[in-house]
């Protein structure tokens, strides 16, 4: 077993949190290694929403133009579609800043963008096919990980001043540390599958709810990535009912898709997402920090999991980079401050998701809501506007006072605590590298944190 590898910051997991953290640490001049267990980022049925807060972060990092060049769709409003018609409940055009929309982009494209930018930094290393399988300890302190090279099965050790687990809701590093998250009851699971998309179909996304049935379709260009909500634990029974029964349910909910359901030839093509809503009580051990889904598994409701994980990474980099840059040991008190900052927006969003879960499967779900883009009915007509008198009181208020539609838009697209890139990590699109004088700027920007009291699966 090879054991001579060392780095300063070791990031386990090359998802959104891991790649953003790796880029920011490298831009701080911190020697950083990211372990990604796969050879690439091409895995289906992952979150695709990049919200306004993350788009703003990309601009600050000088990556906005590169992101804009990726194939993507933009959503600028949120609607609920009732059986009686539709009503707009969120208006993203009222958001502050340059981005009044949510971008839908395949996550692998986003991760490739972050990896390319990080690899421009001399202190960054991305090690692919490297599966972390255990933690290294010096007494009670975590000092690195053991990992397996998946190309040849060989095992290696890499030591680090700080290990950050970003390896998703099934985190192997969390289990190795003996950390068990608190689990909140979730009444839903999700079936993911693909269906062909046609040029005449709506762009961006489609949502539909009726009679307790709920589906969301995400535009992937030539196909739809479809999510169909099912009751928790009902997977086996629904599979036993057979493919034809499932096709009938989708055709009843989405009649305009009925003529292409033959493309779904087996229920083996339908993948189960076991929806979890979990949160660690403690996100850290000596020498170890957990962020993103490893610390708090999110429901797919609202599609906010990616953006919350990215915000975790930004806060962690800003608060921890100075200690790592100086070569000293990162005290656990500093790791605790990262958790303090990111805990309350996480708890607030998870609370909202728990309410949404209950609403979806309650008796109100048949006439309640689901976020959908403002598109014409694919059958050729338009979805009629729901009569005001048929709406619940909150929706009547949103229709009567359109300015209120900016509130849910802001909660979805920006969130309760957006994080911004530190000055030392910012770049203009033309600027290839930080000037030599930014070392002092890094410490000046971040040092105050030392004394401050303050809705996919990898």
Image: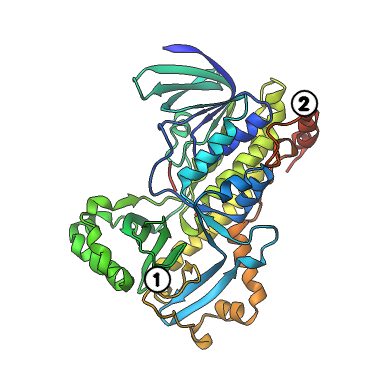
Query: In the figure, 59 relative to 153: above or below?
Result: below
Which mark, by number, is residue 209?
Answer: 1
Q: Position of residue 62 (x, y in %)?
A: 66, 42
User: Position of 278 compared to 398: left or right?
Assistant: left
Q: Quadrant of the C terminus?
A: top left
Residue placed at 45% from the left, 75% from the top?
376
Q: Residues within 10 Å of mark 2 (few under 14, many from 20)?
A: few
The residue tagged 2 is: 436
Q: Closest to the observer: 281 or 208? A: 208
Q: Is there a contact, CB below 8 Å, between mark 1 and mark 2?
A: no
Q: Closest to the observer: 96 or 122? A: 122
Q: Residues within 10 Å of mark 1 (few under 14, many from 20)?
A: many
Residue 213 appears in view: yes
Circle 2: element type: loop
Residue placed at 31% from the left, 59% from the top?
195
Circle 1: element type: strand
Q: Quadrant of the N terminus?
A: top left
Of circles 1 and 2, which is in front?
Answer: 2
Q: Position of residue 141 (x, y in %)?
A: 57, 22
User: Position of 421 compared to 1: left or right?
Assistant: right
Residue 280 appears in view: no
Query: In the figure, 391 relative to 94: above or below?
Result: below
Mark 1 and mark 2 lie on one chain; the one further toward the N terminus is 1
Q: Position of residue 359 (x, y in %)?
A: 45, 68
Q: CA distance from mark 1 to mark 2?
A: 56 Å
Q: Position of residue 372 (x, y in %)?
A: 47, 68
């Amino acid at each position: 077993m090879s054991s001579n590898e060392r780095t300063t910051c070791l990031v386990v997991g090359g998802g959104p949190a891991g790649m953003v953290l790796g880029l920011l640490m490298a831009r701080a001049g911190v020697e950083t290694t990211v372990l990604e267990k796969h050879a690439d980022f091409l895995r289906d049925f992952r979150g695709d929403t990049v919200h306004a807060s993350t788009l703003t972060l990309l601009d600050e990092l000088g990556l906005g133009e590169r992101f804009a060049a990726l194939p993507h769709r933009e959503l600028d409003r949120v609607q609920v579609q009732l059986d009686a018609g539709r009503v707009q409940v969120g208006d993203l055009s009222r958001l502050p800043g340059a981005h009044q929309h949510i971008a839908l982009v395949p996550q692998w494209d986003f991760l490739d963008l972050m990896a390319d930018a990080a690899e421009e930094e001399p202190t960054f290393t991305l090690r692919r096919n490297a599966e972390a399988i255990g933690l290294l300890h010096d007494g009670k302190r975590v000092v690195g990980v053991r990992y397996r090279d998946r190309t040849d099965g060989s095992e290696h050790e890499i030591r680090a001043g700080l290990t950050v687990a970003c390896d998703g809701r099934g985190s192997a590093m969390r289990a190795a540390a003996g950390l068990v998250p608190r689990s909140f009851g979730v009444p839903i699971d999700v079936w993911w599958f693909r269906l062909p998309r046609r040029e005449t179909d709506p762009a961006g996304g489609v949502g539909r709810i009726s009679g307790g049935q709920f589906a969301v379709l995400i535009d992937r260009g030539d196909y739809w990535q479809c999510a169909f909500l099912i009751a928790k634990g009902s997977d086996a029974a629904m599979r036993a009912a057979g493919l034809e029964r499932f096709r009938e349910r989708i055709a009843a909910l989405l009649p305009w898709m009925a003529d292409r359901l033959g493309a779904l030839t087996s229920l083996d093509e339908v993948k189960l997402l076991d929806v979890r809503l979990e949160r660690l009580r403690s996100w850290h051990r000596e020498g170890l920090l957990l962020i993103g889904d490893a610390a708090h598994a999110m429901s797919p409701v609202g599609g906010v999991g990616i953006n919350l994980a990215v915000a975790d990474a930004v806060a962690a980099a800003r608060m921890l980079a100075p200690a790592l840059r100086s070569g000293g040991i990162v005290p656990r008190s500093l790791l605790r401050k990262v958790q303090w900052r990111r805990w309350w927006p996480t708890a607030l969003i998870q609370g909202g998701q728990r309410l949404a879960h209950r609403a979806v499967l309650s008796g109100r779900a048949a006439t309640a809501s689901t976020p959908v883009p403002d598109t014409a009915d694919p059958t050729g007509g338009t979805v009629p506007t729901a009569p005001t008198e048929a709406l619940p009181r909150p929706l009547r208020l949103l229709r009567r006072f359109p300015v209120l539609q900016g509130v849910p838009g802001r909660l979805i697209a920006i969130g309760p605590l957006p994080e911004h890139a530190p000055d030392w990590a910012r770049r203009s699109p033309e600027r290839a590298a930080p000037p030599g004088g930014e070392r002092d700027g890094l410490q000046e920007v971040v040092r105050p944190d030392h004394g401050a009291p303050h809705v996919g699966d990898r």
